[in-house]
Image: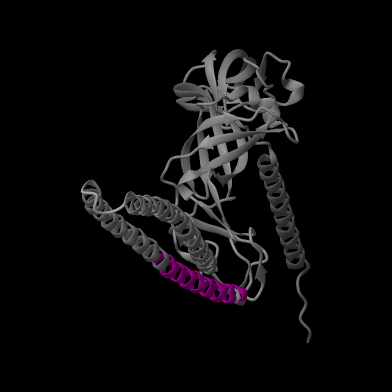
């Protein structure tokens, strides 16, 4: 015997299933519509607003540059040599007299030996000349002394003969003979004195000549010793060893007058800034400058604005404080802001788009309820972050920074017009 399901029960089951599918379809349609609405709302453009407040406004001219030393000492090789040892490398702090490079030159050693021999020869020649001149001096002085003794004896003899002549004991001829001999002795004495005086002058000249030859040999030796000392190249000033020349390597030759190193004084570093030539009329010596050195900001002052233009840029020299960061180095890239106007407690707001250079009057849209009303304002100093409000706005008011171009001619713009895009 077979069982049969009633037709009424099957119809009710089918109706319930259709109803469930219909409700599910309606729910899915509502969910899709709700998601679409949210997506549309999220895609609506956000309003770019700025609030008026009070604060500092800095108007500046931006520039880029590097640190340069005011005084740069070049270390020069004073003799030829071959590099033997490098004692210090770039980046090292040095003091005056510190050893930088050691060189060798065998020729200088041989020159020193020859110079030492020349000094010994000059000393020996001077000693020999001194001994010879002393002998000649003694001989001349003895000759003078003997003639003086001879004169004294002749004078006594004359005195005796004169007495005998008066007594007519001797003939007058004998008296005249002794008188003549006395006069001859006096003449010889005078001549000997002249010879001694001339010898003294000649001796002095001869001694001077030998002294000069010895002095020349000693100076030549001193110069050679000095050249040997210059094989040890030392720092001629205190500072930072900035760089060594490209040819500085162990084993390479160095010629006299070659620049081997540069030493800079970190305390003399200044900022060499490049600014656009179109803004050079805004800057002048004495203006304050904010210099960014790595992660640290320093306050500087313009000391010179170069008159010439190169590649549409003008150089500006900025004096920095004496105490610089430890990482300040020559040729370090830096940025700078030259303060050309500064207001400490100014009415300010974020700059709107489209402001022209030098523009002072400006039409903006100020929020008022559900609308943005057009209003004319007067602006003063302007930086990248803020513009100074001289007239037309109050603290707390909101500005529309970038109104759509097709709505800018209207007196007011509604929020609906902005949110519709």
Magenta residues, as a range? Answer: 107-134
Residue 28: x and y in percent read: 71, 53
404 shown above or below 166: above
Q: Nearer the viewer, residue 15 or 256?
A: 256
Q: How is the image coloured?
A: one colour
Look at 75% across and 36% down and name the residue there.
311
Q: Main structural element of the magenta stretch: helix, strand or loop?
A: helix
Q: From what the image shows, is residue 166 above or below residue 202?
A: above
Q: List x then y, in percent, for residue 45.
A: 68, 36
Inspect the magenta stretch and tell me whether residue 128 lies in it. yes
Seen at 52% across and 75% down, the residue is: 117
Q: Is residue 5 left or right of residue 93?
A: right
Q: Quadrant of the C terminus?
A: top right
Q: Nearer the viewer, residue 53 or 285?
A: 285
Quadrant of res 137: bottom left
Measured as percent of width and height from the top left, residue 72 is found at 55, 49
Which quadrant of the view contains residue 128? bottom left
**Is 201 within the magenta?**
no
Q: Position of residue 327 (x, y in %)?
A: 49, 54
């Amino acid at each position: 015997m077979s069982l049969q399901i009633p037709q009424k029960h099957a119809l009710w089951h089918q109706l319930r299933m259709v109803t469930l599918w219909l409700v599910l379809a309606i729910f899915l349609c509502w969910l899709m519509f709700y998601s679409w609405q949210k997506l549309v709302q999220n895609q609506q453009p956000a309003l770019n607003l700025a609030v008026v407040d009070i604060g500092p406004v800095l108007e500046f001219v931006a520039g880029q540059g590097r640190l340069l030393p005011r005084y740069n000492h070049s270390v020069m090789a004073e003799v030829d040599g071959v590099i033997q040892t490098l004692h210090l490398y770039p980046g090292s702090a040095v003091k005056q007299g510190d050893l930088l490079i050691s060189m060798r030159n065998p020729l200088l050693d041989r020159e020193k030996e020859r110079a030492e021999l020349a000094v010994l020869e000059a000393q020996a020649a001077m000693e020999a000349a001194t001994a010879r001149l002393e002998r000649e001096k003694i001989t001349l002085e003895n000759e003078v002394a003997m003639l003086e003794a001879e004169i004294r004896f002749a004078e006594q003899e004359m005195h005796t003969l004169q007495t005998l002549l008066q007594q007519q004991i001797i003939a007058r001829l004998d008296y005249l003979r002794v008188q003549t001999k006395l006069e001859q002795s006096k003449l010889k004495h005078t001549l000997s004195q002249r010879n001694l005086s001339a010898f003294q002058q000649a001796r002095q000249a001869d001694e001077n000549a030998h002294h000069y030859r010895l002095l020349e040999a000693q100076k030549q030796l001193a110069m050679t010793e000095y050249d040997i000392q210059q094989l040890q190249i030392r720092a001629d000033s205190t500072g930072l060893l900035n760089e060594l020349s490209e040819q500085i390597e162990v084993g390479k030759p160095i010629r006299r007058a070659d620049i081997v190193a540069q030493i800079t004084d970190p305390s003399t570093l200044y900022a060499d800034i490049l600014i656009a030539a179109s803004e050079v009329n805004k800057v002048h010596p004495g203006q304050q400058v904010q210099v960014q050195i790595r992660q640290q900001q320093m306050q500087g002052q313009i000391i010179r604005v170069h008159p010439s233009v190169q590649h549409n840029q003008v150089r500006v020299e900025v004096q920095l404080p004496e105490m610089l960061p430890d990482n300040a180095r020559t040729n370090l890239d830096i940025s700078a802001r030259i303060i050309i106007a500064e207001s400490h407690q100014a009415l300010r707001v974020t700059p709107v788009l489209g402001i022209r250079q030098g523009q002072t009057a400006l039409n903006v849209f100020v929020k008022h309820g559900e609308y943005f009303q057009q209003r004319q304002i007067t602006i003063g100093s302007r930086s990248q972050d803020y513009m100074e409000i001289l007239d037309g706005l109050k603290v707390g008011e909101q500005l529309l920074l970038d109104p759509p171009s097709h709505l800018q001619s209207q007196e007011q713009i509604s929020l609906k017009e902005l949110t519709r895009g």
